[in-house]
Image (cartoon, rainbow, N blue to C red):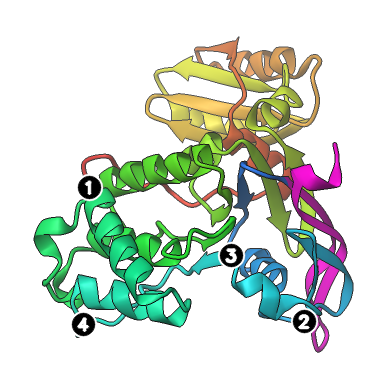
Amino acid sequence: MSGGDIAIRARGLTKCFGELRAVDDVDLTVERRQVYGFLGPNGSGKSTSIRMLCGLLTPTDGEIEVLGLRIPEQAETLRQRIGYMTQQFSLFADLTLQENLEFLAAVQNLPPKKARERVDELLEEYHFSDRANQLAGTMSGGQKQRLALAGSVIHNPELLFLDEPTSAVDPESRRDFWEKLFELADAGTTILVSSHYMDEAERCHRLAILDRGVLVADGSPAELTGRLADRTLEIKGEHPRQAKHIVLTVSGVISAAQIGNSLRVLCAEAGDCAARIQDALANASVDAEVVPAAPNLEDVFVAVTNKQPQQQPSEHS
């Protein structure tokens, strides 16, 4: 892989706040035109890492190269080539949608004629043409999110940083948002997005999982789930709560989570874990069937962090 194919390369990335080591010796490589995901629990170092990669925060140690530029030394040059969107709606509530975009075009020093063309283009592309004169503060959460994304790409950045951008919107808005991200990636934009939603992680081309500042997993979703081959089981029975208490006493079981009327079990290693679970259930006179289950990213998350991920919102909530 040549240097021109790499959008972000970080080696030994470290950030300390006093005694707290918020990011600890992280190595990271992000290819151009990828949607690269940062997954991790709150406090895992995702936001701190993004701020260092953007040049907004100086690392305690390590080397960063973004779009061929040394960071933080060349951070000012980098800012002209990247977009950055936080989880909080950061535009002006008392300006209209069009005025918000016009302001951001001016901040990015777009020439007046190009700015007008780009604002009109984004209003059309993000389905805001009939709302151009609406105050931004009166929009729904999903609409604000789309406007913030439009604002972050007004200067056609090569690289887009998104810090938990969908944490406060409904599932339908999240799906629409991700469609826009893939359109941007197809057009050549590299995207680094942090999230704690498993379904979003599955959409990424490649994924890094952080835990307490440490990079604990890195790979494509298929690569990461493939590492758990033969370690995930499903237990089907009439009394899942009773079965769970028994399963958690079995040697080699990392976690057991109830999903509907069944249990999803993660084992420390492939082998005879299923047989030990079946024996324990039989000895306790619990009638249940233990069958193999295909691993998913939630299993990966639990395996590398030993934490349960945040509950996903219902499609009908």
Residue 2 among magenta residues: yes
Q: Which residue is mark 3?
A: 82
Q: Which mark is residue 69?
A: none
Q: Residue at x 81, y 89 (%)?
A: 18
Q: Which residue is mark 2?
A: 58
SS category of the residue bearing label 3 = strand
Instruction: Quote the CA–CA distance across marks 3 and 4.
Output: 24 Å
Q: Residue at x 66, y 30 (%)?
A: 266
SS category of the residue bearing label 2 = loop
Q: Nearer the viewer, residue 109 or 185?
A: 109
Q: Main secondary structure of the magenta part?
A: strand
Q: Is residue 14 visible?
A: yes
Q: Which residue is mark 4?
A: 95
Q: Earlier in the sequence, mark 1 or mark 4?
A: 4
Q: Earlier in the sequence, mark 2 or mark 4?
A: 2
SS category of the residue bearing label 1 = loop
Q: Which residue is mark 1?
A: 317
Q: Amino acid at mark 3?
A: Ile
| Image x and y of residue 89, in percent | 35, 73
